[in-house]
Structures are given as structure tokens and as C-alpha cells.
Amino acid sequence: MFQKSDESVKFQLIRNLVHVLKLFNNDAREDLVDLYLTAQKDQRKWRYRKLIATQIPQLLELYSQDTIFSIIMPISFKLCQDIVYDVRTKAAEYMHLFILRFSQPLNQTFLVMQPAFIKFLYNFRNAPSALSSDSASPRNTTSARFSCR
């Protein structure tokens, strides 16, 4: 779907995708979550990635815990490690929502995810360039890489 589209069409598709997904049943949503994986892969399109990061709260409401754990959370972790400051900070702004989503009610998925998530947050908090920048410009490409291992 994304291969030959005009860039403005892609941007509008990503912008409205979360609203369109609300109209579908759960099975159809599960089939369409791959569009987010495809959209966030292009490292030259930081605006797409920032747009996806702003949709994290809505995605957490739309998808099952299994889909969040297997697809949405890895996308969010990757966005928190993005080379563009605005993408990193927008994604990091919503990371606490994963803890809230998985801890209510406490379940096996949360217990499996908790150590890696806490380590990621610790590394993100202690990374010197992750949340501070001399320039708030989206073009600031200071590389800040983090490990979830």
C-alpha cells in the first residue's frame, strides 16, 4: 500500500489511520497493524515516525495486549531510539501508558515484559542526549542508541 503512493497521501493515510481503525472490528484491526510497521521503517521520513508516536495512546486503546506486546511496544521502543529528537521525545512521552495498560489487571504478559521495560526506561533516563538537546529542531540528528537487552 505504501510503495508507490505520493508522500502527501502517505502522510494523510498515517494521520487518519488510527481513526479509520476505530471503525473496524478487532480482526480487521489486527490485519492492518502491519501498516504501522511499514510506515515507521523509512528512516528518511521522520515526520511519519513522529506522527506514529503521537498515536501511541490511541493504539493502546484499540489493540489487544498480545498485539501491543508483540507489535506496538517494539515500534514504540524503536521510536524512543530514533535519530530525530522530536520523534524520541514524543514516543518517550507515552511510554508510561504501557505500564498502565499492562498492569491493570496484572497479568502474565506484564510479568514477562516488566524487567526489559524497566531496564529500557533506566537506560533511556540515563542517556545523556535522549531527553536534552541544545536545539529543539526536528533536524537534530544526535544519535542516541539504547539497549533493551
Image (cartoon, rainbow, N blue to C red):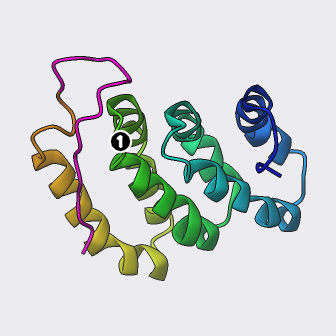
Seen in the picture, residue 149 relative to 44 is either above or below; the reply is below
Q: Position of residue 48 (x, y in %)?
A: 59, 36
Q: Considering depth in this image, is 50 or 45 the residue closer to the camera?
A: 45
Local crowd size for mark 1, using a 10 Å CA cut-off: few (<14), some (14–19), many (≥20): many
Seen in the picture, residue 84 relative to 60 is either above or below; the reply is above
Q: Position of residue 123 (x, y in %)?
A: 16, 56
Q: Residue at x 89, y 59 (%)?
A: 25
- Which residue in the structure is indicated by mark 1? 92
- Quadrant housing residue 31: bottom right
Q: Considering depth in this image, is 47 or 148 the residue closer to the camera?
A: 47
**Residue 145 is a magenta residue:** yes
Which secondary structure dominates the residues rendered in magenta? loop
Residue 78 left/right relative to 72: left
Q: Residue at x 56, y 59 (%)?
A: 72
Residue 115 left/right relative to 113: left
Q: Amino acid at mark 1?
A: Ala
Q: Which residues are magenta?
A: 133-149
Residue 12 left/right relative to 140: right
Seen in the picture, residue 29 relative to 54 is either above or below; the reply is below
